[in-house]
Image: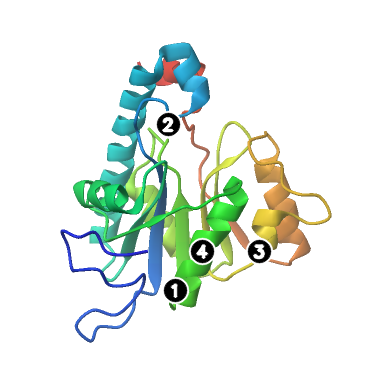
Amino acid sequence: MRRPRGQSGQAHFGSAQNGQARPREWLIVMGRWPAPGRCKSRLAVALGSRRAAAIQRALSGHGLAEARRAAALRPGLALALAVSGLGPKGSGRWAEALGADWVGLQGEGRLGWRLQRQLGLARRQGAQRVVLIGSDLPELAAADLAAAFNALAHCDVVLGPAADGGYWLIGLAGNWPRLFAGGPRAIAWGGNQVMAQTLAVADQLGLVVTLLPIRHDLDRPEDLRRWR
């Protein structure tokens, strides 16, 4: 990951600036470029690609606004945007517009691989606590993110359960790849057992887990009824 051009040059992900220590806490937002044809297919099929893109754009703006509020309350917290659906230069411009400190690409693969990739980048640069969220959370508040980082002071993993059986947030005070790959059976990403399977793996690993309140994300057209 790199800093957006409009901020402090092109320093690499996690590198110290002006002699300062590298960030020990990272908040990474997994964002999808909100352009017609590149947003969630289930929304686009039902609502049309332009409306789906407009909804995704609003959700991304809301998510980054709450992330910035959380970062303002935690000096030294690095706020990163991990982008899919857009190239490096466009991602930098988008991250700058949304107020992220750092930007990078999610890369290929299923969600578990992409989450693990971002966690690995942060950990290799010295991060001790990493929180990852999506950009489809109308209910997200800065207090949720603060609660996640506070929980990581006394647990290994923090999870925000989603109403659909997944999770809307995962925070880690270490690196346990099995949380993203699963155990004997792979985690069924996109299904309604992701949360239960993740908790089962955490139990197998002997990890201490804290759960945040249940939240609703916005994946399907019927989810819009809650926000009208």
Rendering coords of residue 38 (x, y %): 42, 31
- Name the residue carrying label 1: 127
Give, as a three-letter code, the residue at label 1: Ala
Which class describes the residues within 10 Å of circle 1: few (<14), some (14-19), or many (20+)? many
Q: Which mark is residue 119?
A: 4
Q: CA distance from mark 1 to mark 2?
A: 31 Å
Rendering coords of residue 26 (x, y %): 39, 64
Rendering coords of residue 157 (x, y %): 58, 61
Give, as a three-letter code, the residue at label 2: Arg
Q: Which of the two residues, 202 or 116, is positioned nearer the viewer here?
A: 116
Q: Earlier in the sequence, mark 3 or mark 2?
A: 2
- Residue at position x 42%, y 35% in the image: 136
Residue 195, placed above or below residue 202: above
Q: Which mark is residue 38?
A: 2
Q: Earlier in the sequence, mark 3 or mark 4?
A: 4
Give, as a three-letter code, the residue at label 4: Leu
The colour scheme is rainbow
